[in-house]
Amino acid sequence: MLKTTMLLLKPQNHRWVSSLRSRNDAVVLGDKAILYLKRHPQNLASLIPHFTPEAASYLLLKSQFDQTTTLNFLAWAHTHPFLTLPCKCVALHILTRFKLYKSAQTLAQDVARIAESDSDGAVVFKHLIESYHSCNSSSAVFDLVVKSYSKLNLIDKAVNIVSLAKCHGFMPSVLSYNVILDAILRFRGSLEDAECVFREMVRNGVSPNVYTYNVMIRGFVVGGELEKGFGIVREMERNGCLPNVVTYNTLINACCKAKRVGDGFELLRAMARKGVGANLISYNAVLNGLCREGRMSETLELLEEMNRRGLAPDEVTYNTLVNGYCKEGNFHQALVLHAEMASKGLSPDVVTYTTLINSMCKVKNLSRAMEFLDQMRSRGLYPNERTYTTIIDGFCQQGLLNEAYKVLSEMIVSGFSPSIITYNALIHGYCFLGRIDEAIGILSDMVERGLTPNVISYSTIISGFCRNHALDKAFQMKLEMVEKGILPDAVTYSSLIQGLCKQQKLVEAFDLFQEMLRSSLQPDEFTYTTLINAYCVEGELSKALQLHDEMIKKGFWPDDVTYSVLINGLDKKARTREAKKLLLKLFYDESIPSDVTYNTLIENCSDNEFKSVVALVKGFCTKGLMNEADRVFKTMLQRDYKPNGAVYNLIIHGHCRWGNVHKAYNLYKEMMQCGFVSRPVTLIALVKALSSEGKNDELSHLMQNILRSCRLNDAELAKGLVEINFKEGNMDAVLNMLTEMAKDGLLPDGGKYSYAPAST
């Protein structure tokens, strides 16, 4: 708890001043110093050996209404020993009265530092009281000292100064309480102490202002007490203190970080209703919340609203959106926004560049990733550890270890030590190339550098052994990691199960699967699909279907790979009808799973369950079962749920592949009207199909749309080449160029979507 010390003092100002004046030497020195300060400052040095604290105090008191002389004296005297603690307290009174608060605060912080033996601030307070009346001071000096102590995290001293001031008849202002509250929350993070001071403030008759309430609200929301933050808002409104833009921004930001973007939106609307103008910080906070939740389509409406209010996006806005689109996988739009930033003279920050680099690494466009790294440097930004590790991982993912080590060398020269993530990337690179012994060597390097390999380090090597059919070594590595206290995770078990399945050791694989369950590790879709595939290969379809049903009951929904495995297995047994029925189970067979129907899947469309609908459509399209795919599409429309871009892209591509180009083109037009963006693979398939069918008018319209959507400057040359070849009828060249543009991220990319109910 906060401690206070009481000190009762009687003013002794007249005796103290008279005693100073009785000292002739001090008077003579003080007057001479005043003369030198005004006319002969070069002579001041001659006074230093003889100048005393009494002379300094005399000078300050005599010149206390002469601001220039006072400031010049302090500038000369501040490094000399004759400017003692009592003298500095006199100076604090004078500077505060002159309202030179910045200079006064600097001096007060100096006082706080030199008075180390003053454990509770009582000595400083004593000197302030003794000189208070002689300096014609005010209680503002106590506020200033409290502020200085608070900023130096000397909170107990600050609180005691407030208590001493009250005991001597001074009423500290709301400023003192505000800075103490701010310091408690910033330095200690103690909501209990802050509430104690806040309630004491109210009891003492000091009315909190909007800053007080904002400090408390920030403290609660940072401490995870969002509802208490809202409670403070209600209290301030009851007390007639209106929330300002800072109040709302604090709550909006907290709501969005707590994944309560709806509440953030409501606060934004409340600001408008109550006449509080939302600023760029308000909108950026909501945009950040939407991007965190992958609700990128809603950001467009918010940007339009910002534009109507005359708020131009800044670097924070763009960086937030670029990060959001990269996270969603819509790299095309992220690159468009990056180019737009540059055209407006705005610069991405290190985090955004790292995100762009990571995105390029994910699509294996490492040359573009390195371009972004060079661009960072040209803008005066320095890559951080994560930037370097991201690029190293990008090279390692493709087995380009020489390039990875070049970046690693640069990373070390730049002063960054490789982290465990960096080493794990190198381990993956060696395993990718089948150089497992060298990957194991990295483990030794890690230990020598004081890093402990983690479960990812071992699991990566185990996976490498399994891919190279070295199961004995893989299981030996599993034993080694357990002996070192590192428990296998789901990835470790899945890799080993896959290795056993590849060698047709299904009994051992299933035993390991059971061990995994006993270890309270949940298998994922990959684990189940691996076992299902193994059973299908062995012709044990009943066990495969049993695992399919089990994974659904445990909340893991089959993806398109799982369905493809099952379809292939059933087809090999001439059970095509059963394959179709399997794919329709989620729609028409309410008993499997018993607690999930089509409607509940739709209602929980934000959850992982709904991935199965996209997987189902993809499964039909992959096998050419387009009538079934159309039935799924039609069912969604009948039940008032709009198919999203993902479904459109799948079914368009499916119809192109299986010969119904007319339907594919009509669905493409419908998709454009709905505002969805086509994936590059969809566009290329449609171009190829229209060209093959000789549908020139439709092809011309499609090409215009494609070229119009390529907004990046980087795409200009490619667009020109595509247009020339298209006009000359050279469709092979057009398709090749579009493919290259897609690889470089220059074509529009619909990315990932979520499902949304149709508006009623």
Image (cartoon, rainbow, N blue to C red):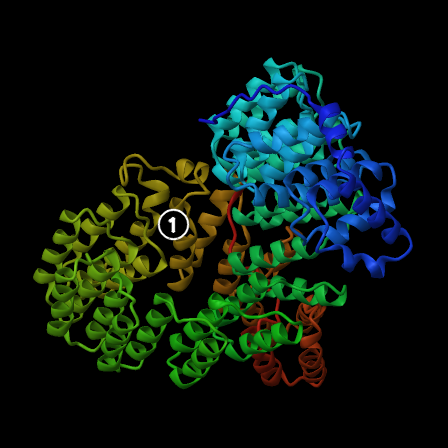
Residue 69 is left or right of residue 619, and the answer is right
Q: Residue at x 30, y 74 (%)?
A: 427
The location of residue 51, given as percent across then percent down, is 72, 50
Residue 83, position in %: x, y?
Answer: 68, 46
Q: Residue at x 56, y 22 (%)?
A: 7
Helix, strand or loop at disc 1?
Answer: helix
Outermost residue on the right side: it is 39
- The quadrant of the image that shows the C terminus is top right
226 to 382, vertically: above or below: above
Question: What residue did someone put label 1 on?
Answer: 612
Image quarter in which the N terminus is found:
top left
Q: Position of residue 535 (x, y in %)?
A: 17, 61
The reply, left or right, for residue 197 in relation to residue 435 is right
Q: Against 65, is 432 above or below?
A: below
- Residue closer to the observer: 462 or 213: 213
- The amino acid on which the numbered mark 1 sits, given as a three-letter code, is Ser
- Residue drawn where x is 84% and y is 40% of the image: 63
Based on the displayed image, in which of its 4 quarters is residue 153 positioned? top right
In the image, is 565 to the left or to the right of 18?
left
Is the residue marked by circle 1 packed among few (<14), some (14-19), or many (20+) residues within 10 Å? many
Residue 366, position as x, y percentages in the image: 50, 77
